[in-house]
Image (cartoon, rainbow, N blue to C red):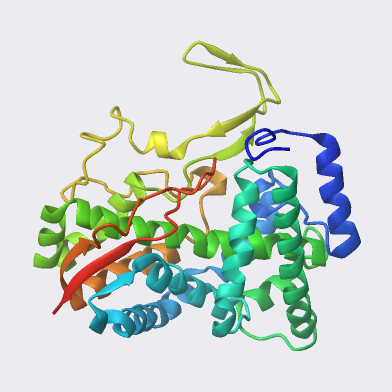
Amino acid sequence: EGQGGGRGRLDSERAQRMLQLYKDKGWVPAPTLAGRDDPNHKQMRAMFNEAFRPKKIDAMDPLVEQTAYKLIDAFIGDGKCDWVKQFAVPLPLIIIGKQMGVKEEDIWKIKAWTDAWVQRLGMMQTEEEERWSVEMEIEAQHYFQPIFERLRKEPDDTLVSEMVNRVIPEWGRPLNDNELHAEMMADTFVGGSETSTNAIAYGVKLLIDNPDVWDRLKSDPEKYLRTFVEEVLRLEGPVQGLFRTTSKDLEVHGVHIPKGSMINVRYAAANRDSSEFSCPEKLDLDREKPGRHLAFGSGIHHCLGAPLARRELYWSFKALIDRVDELWFQPGRNDFKVMPNFALRALSELHIGFKAK
């Protein structure tokens, strides 16, 4: 099967082969929180609501700040960097990793696993590529399983301990191994790192593309920085769209969509809707109600990690403002190629040059 020939095929026999691979070598992932409907979704989400309560997120703020400055100070003397590899990837992985019992030296191992998972999510793989993704996920499962088993005997105050041990009242039990493995990859590491990485990367690209915005941001970060974060999320939302199944027959702009249809909800298109946003293509530091976008979804599936993601973006750009005076793209080093994916939008690299303060 050629690189392009089998992409996007929904093949039930192929799906069964992937399922058997999980059964033979690992754990079959259960439906994730993001893929559940109420009341089951609400019951499970209550556990995460507790884990992501405001006081707990507030307590993580110093760690986010310290990590941002530590990372940027490691390369500030070089006058150049690959912003993706040296900053945008490690920052959120370090933060969520500490909550998930992961050693900092293992973050690149985690990154390889999340990359494989994201590629499968994009529904553009050949069967051989999908098999590789599944085998990478199974490798991750065997990394996390001993962590689950240790925390069942010796709970601590991390998020992963909460996930392992908290009993969901309506279920009469905590999450089982299959449910835990699904959550670790999908809603925790991909949701908790990949999305922030992509927004942090595109934020710097937007600053270089819009030097007037960079100048205003430097002139008064306290006034403009939070609006800039929201505009990055609106214009370059990491989650471009997700697949959903219609619960009833409906009509959209004259197109009939039957109940049970698979649809792709394009959040990115909504964020550039001219009926909702004036000059939607413009990065506007004076935009009213800048947080009124769909970068984190909407309704019962609104992203649980949104407050943490906003803090990660804030401290990423604040550290950059505090350490750097001028920014530019390294000549001939960037093709700005976006990795092919129906769901997420990501830069694989961003080579920048800068003049430190």
- In this rendering, position of residue 97 left or right of residue 61: right
**Residue 262 seen by the camera:** yes
The quadrant holding residue 176 is bottom right
- In this rendering, position of residue 11 left or right of residue 87: right
Relative to 346, say whether 97 is above or below. Answer: below
Query: Split into 4 quadrants, where in the image is the N terminus?
Result: top right
The quadrant holding residue 247 is top right
- Please tell me which residue is depicted at 80% across the width and 81% down the height of the picture: 149
Q: Nearer the viewer, residue 57 or 102?
A: 102
Give the image location of residue 108, x and y in percent.
56, 74
Which residue is outermost to the top?
Answer: 254
The quadrant holding residue 73 is bottom left
Relative to 259, say whether 240 is above or below. Answer: below
- In this rendering, position of residue 28 left or right of residue 55: right
**Residue 229 seen by the camera:** no
Give the image location of residue 103, x and y in percent.
59, 84
